Image (cartoon, grey):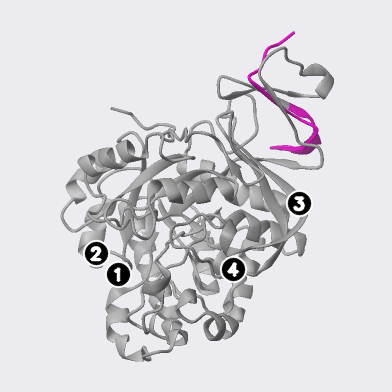
Amino acid sequence: MATFDLILTGGTVHLPSGPVQASVGVRGGKIAAIGAPSTIVSDAGETIDCTGLDILPGVIDTQVHFREPGLVHKEDLESGARAAVLGGVTAVFEMPNTKPNTDSADAIQEKLMRAHHRMWCDHAFYVGATNHNAAELAELERLPGTAGVKIFMGASTGDLLVSEDSSLAEVLASGHRRVAIHAEDEARMNARAGERVTGDAGSHPVWRDDESALLATRRILALARAARRRIHVLHVTTPAELELLGQNKDIATCEVTPQHLTLAGEEAYPRLGTLAQMNPPIRSGAHRDGLWHWLQQGVVDILGSDHAPHTAEEKARTYPDSPSGMPGVQTMLPLMLNHVAAGRTTLARVIDLTSAGPQRVFNIAGKGRIAVGYDADFSIVDLKARWTITDDWLASRCGWSPFTGMEITGKPIGTIVRGHCVMWDGALADAAIGEPIRFEGVEFG
């Protein structure tokens, strides 16, 4: 009789080949066996009955801002990771626009130390590109626990900004891993600052318009091709960008967010005001529909939450003095399950965008699929559960969501990280066990 530390039984398991009724045996934090329940029995460990539930590969959110160090009144690594696992997310890539910026080896090491067994999920940290650290990036991107390099072409929260073509070229020339890009054109936004209307958050997408996004994406594609460097364009908001990115798949991958797939500016700004303000902006219903079109065409590689919390008091400032960003790591999977229930996409496509896609784009080691030898990361969901997002369910320190009050079909029930059940039915485990994510082909140390 084989011995396993954990067995998941009774559920529908979503393998690379598709869904099957099977049990999964876990040993030493890895998937050790997949098969009929009669073939996977154990005389030790824990068994979790998943009858009526779907067992997905662990959801990987490759864009979160957990605000530590320096901005912990909004969020910290513990609270952000707690929100992640309550939402069914097993691993995150955290962004570098903290105070101080995460732009050096010491800063990466400090974040790893802060995260150690305070974060409930596995994690990696981006190093931020600046106008001064380009020569160091080839070394920095290979540090343990580093997700790669992040470039802000347009100013957003914090002061990380690389906007000139010469500086961007220098950054792209240093290193080999895929570079994540916030693509908004700083010069155009500066020229259009007068388009902002005091007190009207609905003018945010007028200021940061389609052309500011498309211009930056065109520029970074040309620079990346000249440097022969792979890029990943984050939080794409315009159909024109996705059409362009679809013509450059040899060098560029891309991401969309659940909020851009769910909210439409015509409704969101009158109802939510500055709570709907983010960079790049929530745009029109036509833009939202266009994103769905290109997602269905297969152009989109990854779904990321761009979890970027600010306090309710900060968001209550009069636009444009209000900060841009909204929480999203906890609501990402529920929103997408709701879109599945509504027939806008399939569960297989959601799995590709949140598990297989991140693994493929970023060469994550041992994650992204349910297969023997892979990390035992699972997001366990009830596809039929009908419920309402409420403030008391939210774990982010900011305490609010633009989706509060939304009725959802599909709910995360369990989050398992390397064989540890860190969340079940809204209750957390006794201890956080998150560890750094490993990447294929990266020389550690």
Frontmost of labels 3 and 2 is 3
Frontmost of labels 1 and 4 is 4
Q: Which residue is mark 2?
A: 159
Q: Is residue 198 left or right of residue 373?
A: left
Q: Is residue 12 left or right of residue 29?
A: right
Q: Earlier in the sequence, mark 1 or mark 4?
A: 1
Q: Are marks 2 and 1 in contact (CB under 8 Å)?
A: yes
The amino acid type of the residue labelled 1 equals Ala
Q: Earlier in the sequence, mark 4 or mark 3?
A: 3
Q: Which mark is residue 155?
A: 1
Q: Is residue 57 left or right of residue 317?
A: right
Marks 3/1: CA distance?
A: 39 Å
Marks 4/3: CA distance?
A: 19 Å
Q: Are marks 3 and 1 in contact (CB under 8 Å)?
A: no
Asked if one can make out residue 251 in the rendered structure from this viewpoint, the answer is: no
The secondary element bearing badge 3 is classed as strand
Percent x, y of residue 396: 47, 56
Percent x, y of residue 295: 62, 62
Q: Which residue is mark 3?
A: 383
| 401 versus 395 height, above or below | below
Q: Earlier in the sequence, mark 3 or mark 1?
A: 1
Marks 1/4: CA distance?
A: 26 Å
